Image (tube, helix red, strand yellow):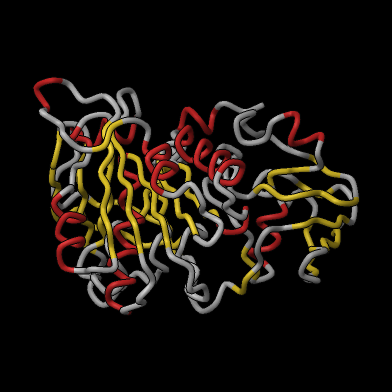
Amino acid sequence: MAYQITIRNTGHRFTAEQGQTVLQAALAADLVLPYGCRDGACGSCKGRLVEGQFDYGSYSQKALSDQDKGNGYALFCQGKPLSDIVIEAREVRKAGDIQVRTLPARVHRIERPCDDVAILYLKLPANERLQFIPGQYLDILLRDGARRSFSMGNAPHDEEFVQLHVRHVPGGSFTDHVFGKMKERDILRLEAPLGTFYLREESAKPIVFVASGTGFAPIKSIIESAFRKASGRPMTLYWGGRRPRDLYMNEIPVHWATEHPGLRYVPVISEALPEDAWTGRTGLVHRAVMEDFPDLSGHQVYACGVPVMVDAARRDFTALCGLPEEDFFCDSFTTAADKAAGG
């Protein structure tokens, strides 16, 4: 049995086969709704169910609270229609010519800029190139069927290697492998490109980027691509970490700010120790943004990193700084543990 899905705010209509999620059905119809983890953990795909019967599926309470659900919201990466339904989705766009592909890749080089971050440089087979929009991510396909998601840290024009920034999560099967047994010339399988975290180039609004930890990776890709295109939009980058060593590629945005007058860089440290001799901004990274931009009504914000930062930025920027909800774009870096914490 198939059900019709109507997106009320855009007029798009498509069909879901029995057992398909709304997101799966949309992608099959060559439409892209916002999404991130696809596991009900990040909340990127949240939208409103206006009419119809619905199976909400398994999800994290952090991504969809009981209050959200009571207000008519659902996670479209998990929810399945049980009848014809009408929804409201924040954004729908054509998928374009970039197709999701499964490819092998060889580990060409592993760098360790700090104790708990590894930079993987992956080489695709000869004559293959990975087409993607700056800011998107890929899935590493593990032998047991599990997936691990990582944003591409290189810009699409910098195509010699696919660059991944991997933070070690002790006890995590994949990151333990990266930091323990992975070696150069190992072969990985990946699926890409995925996600809807990318720069909305149709806007001329100034941009505020907010990164925590390895959330710097997709923002690096976006900024390097923007430089290449000479977009001219003013950009401010806030990168937060607990200690200065967490800003594992600090020299790159420092260089950007020197070479590109249109970009300002603000590193923010929350738990500096005396031996760090830190003299820069301190506290929570999203709070630093609020101190500098008490009025965000004329900006776009792109936030990427741990869920607690992304959630706080969304809440405070929209409620306290006047940022329109439709001008907040995010990629929340959920872990395997987050994805397993269903509701």
Of 212 and 191, nearer the camera is 212
Where, quadrant-wise, is the C terminus in this rendering?
top right
Viewer can see residue 132: yes
- Using residue 77 as the reference point, say whether residue 96 is left or right of it: left
* In front of the other: 153 or 303: 303
Report x, y in % for residue 91.
65, 63
Q: How many marks?
A: 0
Q: Which residue is drawn at 39% across and 54% down?
A: 209
Q: Position of residue 121 (x, y in %)?
A: 20, 55
Where residue 158 sits: x, y (%)?
23, 70
Residue 168, can we see it? no
Residue drawn 50% across the image and 57% down it: 195
> Closest to the observer: 321 or 318?
321
Using the rendered view, name the quadrant where residue 133 is placed.
bottom left
Residue drawn at 35 percent across, 69 percent down: 130
| Residue 28 x/y as whole percent | 66, 66
- Residue 314 figure quarter: top right
Task: Please tell me which residue is depicted at 57% across the width and 72% down the height of the picture.
Answer: 95
The correct choice, above or below, for 251 with respect to 157 in the image is above
Look at the picture and state if 305 lies above or below 159. above
Where does the N terminus fall, quadrant-wise? Answer: bottom right
Image height of 222 relative to 278, above or below: below
Residue lying at the far top of the rendered structure: 274
